[in-house]
Image (cartoon, helix red, strand yellow):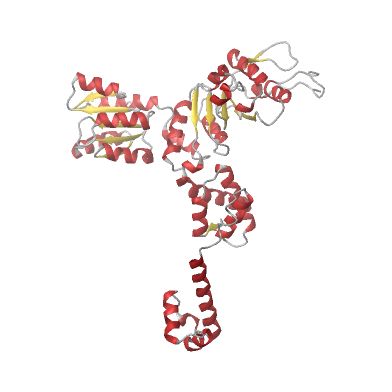
């Protein structure tokens, strides 16, 4: 019996009986199938479902299969598409192929032919989705369609040996993404070595990267292999590559071209087998124009480019990330996780997070450390944001006058009822209001005097 690779398939057809038949066939060999009746519905569920292959009818009411193909080629270019139609004409096949279809099959489709074409489509997508999901979900928290698209791109290139440049603002998780791609690559059993290229002077950076011989410089009391050789067979991650001194860029370019390194003070070059993933928050096109970054090095590093969105571009991830950080801190301390009050969580989700995930993590840790009880309030969030450089955070806790007045009246009425043990007549006299007016105040603020009677 043929062993079929299992995957997540999105089936699009306006014929319910055909959808049922094809779903039975596909699920019968272990695939997970989401079946929808229209192209519009397919676009709605594609990202959330995480389809590895789309199988679509060509002729449908509303948006047809060709229109769906064109949309997918723009928004989900890494998802292979198989077109099935009862109108198996050559012009249809040509149109579907030009629109980006991987394959074109005429109805009725032979079961084994369909399964074989699905196997081919899944093979183009890299490692099986279940394996990929287990890798990235161990490190990345997201439900953002934009981030899911980046993960789909990462999955495609993880199994290749191409150099990858990850761009994005500071704190967006570039090193985390690099680790995920390493762990999903054939090099996963070997080392992942990371270095921040902007964190040390040029001579020390060269030694860290390429190694040095004993006596190569004043403090070189013994020979060191360098990070390229330490990462042999694995991956080296060069963070903030845009900050690398221009003279060292020339030497790095030579390493990438020749696949060998020469230690500082050494006479001979040593072959290395290393995959290079680099990252930067800088605009390298501008750096190249200014002469601060070599164009030839850029093309060596950016065989594939991956742009990570800022946290402001994926606001739906803020709440899940907050819960993730709270759980992680609780596990470290051996305690139950704290929670945010609703208005505190609203403040977190409404904030723009210029420092991205790193800043959010710091604020959550700050809040947990300085909150004694189980619930973190809005004031604690405002204070933490103020200390993290938000000029508006210190004043954001000032409430509108009407809200402040209502809160004062509510608390005042509660205090009176506590003193009088729920006696409305006595409370009204203390407030110097008649009983009818006092009852109106209680109703307006949803206070029941009976709760205060003993």
User: Is 84 placed left or right of 301 in the picture?
Assistant: left
Left or right of residue 79, residue 142 in this image: right
Seen as rendered, the residue at the extreme front is 401
Q: Is residue 26 above or below residue 346?
A: above
Residue at position x 55%, y 61% from top? 398
Say whether residue 4 is visible: no
Give the residue displayed 43% in from the left and 32% down from the top: 152
Q: Quadrant of residue 44?
A: top left
Residue lying at 59% horizontally and 49% vertically, measured from the top left: 390
Answer with left or right where residue 315 lies relative to residue 64: right
**Residue 3, image x, y percentages:** 35, 27
When the figure is inspected, residue 342 is found, relative to residue 318, above or below; the finding is: below
- The x, y position of residue 180, in whole percent, is 52, 33
Of all residues shown, which one is farthest toward the top? 267
Between 209 and 437, the one nearer to me in the picture: 437
Please tell me which residue lies in front, 174 or 241: 241
Query: Looking at the rendering, which quadrant does residue 21 occupy?
Result: top left
Location of residue 426 in the rendering, given as x and y in whole percent from the top left corner: 51, 88
Query: Where's residue 421, x and y in %?
Result: 52, 85
Q: Up-down: is 405 above or below 452? A: above
Is residue 85 shown to the viewer in this render? yes
Total labels drawn: 0
Q: Nearer the viewer, residue 112 or 308?
A: 308
Quarter in which the N terminus is drawn: top left
């Amino acid at each position: 019996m043929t062993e079929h690779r299992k995957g997540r398939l999105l089936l699009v057809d306006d014929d319910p009986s055909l959808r049922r038949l094809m779903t039975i066939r596909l699920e019968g060999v272990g695939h997970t199938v989401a079946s929808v009746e229209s192209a519009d519905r397919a676009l709605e569920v594609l990202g959330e479902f995480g389809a590895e292959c789309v199988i679509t009818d060509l002729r449908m009411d509303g948006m047809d299969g060709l229109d769906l193909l064109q949309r997918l080629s723009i928004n989900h270019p890494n998802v292979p598409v198989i077109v099935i139609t009862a109108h198996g004409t050559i012009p249809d096949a040509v149109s579907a192929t030009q629109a980006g279809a991987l394959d074109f099959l005429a109805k009725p489709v032979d079961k084994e032919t369909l399964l074989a074409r699905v196997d081919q489509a899944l093979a183009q997508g890299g490692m099986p989705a279940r394996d990929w999901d287990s890798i990235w979900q161990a490190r990345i928290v997201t439900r953002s369609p934009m981030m899911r698209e980046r993960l789909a791109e990462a999955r495609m290139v993880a199994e290749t040996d191409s150099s990858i440049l990850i761009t994005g603002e500071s704190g967006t998780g570039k090193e985390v993404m690099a680790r995920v791609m390493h762990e999903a690559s054939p090099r996963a059993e070997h080392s992942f070595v990371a270095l921040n290229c902007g964190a040390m002077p040029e001579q020390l950076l060269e030694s860290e990267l390429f190694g040095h011989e004993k006596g190569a410089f004043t403090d070189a009391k013994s020979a060191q292999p360098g990070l390229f050789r330490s990462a042999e067979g694995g991956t080296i991650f060069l963070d903030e590559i845009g900050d690398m001194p221009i003279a060292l860029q020339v030497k790095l370019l030579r390493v990438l071209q020749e696949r060998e390194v020469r230690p500082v003070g050494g006479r001979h070059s040593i072959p290395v087998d290393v995959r290079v993933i680099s990252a930067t928050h800088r605009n390298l096109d501008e750096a190249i124009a200014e002469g601060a970054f070599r164009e030839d090095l850029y093309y060596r590093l950016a065989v594939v480019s991956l742009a990570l969105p800022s946290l402001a571009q994926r606001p739906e991830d803020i709440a899940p990330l907050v819960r993730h950080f709270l759980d992680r801190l609780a596990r470290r301390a051996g305690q139950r996780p704290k929670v945010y009050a609703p208005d505190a969580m609203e403040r977190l989700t409404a904030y723009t997070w210029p420092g991205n995930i790193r800043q959010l993590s710091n604020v959550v840790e700050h809040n947990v450390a300085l909150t004694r009880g189980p619930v973190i309030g809005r004031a604690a969030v405002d204070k933490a944001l103020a200390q993290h450089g938000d000029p508006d955070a210190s004043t954001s806790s000032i409430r509108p006058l009407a809200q402040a007045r209502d809160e004062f009246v509510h608390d005042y009425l509660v205090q009176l009822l506590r003193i009088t043990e729920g006696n409305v007549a006595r409370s009204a006299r203390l407030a110097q209001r008649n009983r009818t007016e006092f009852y109106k105040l209680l109703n307006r603020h949803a206070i029941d005097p009976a709760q205060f009677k003993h």
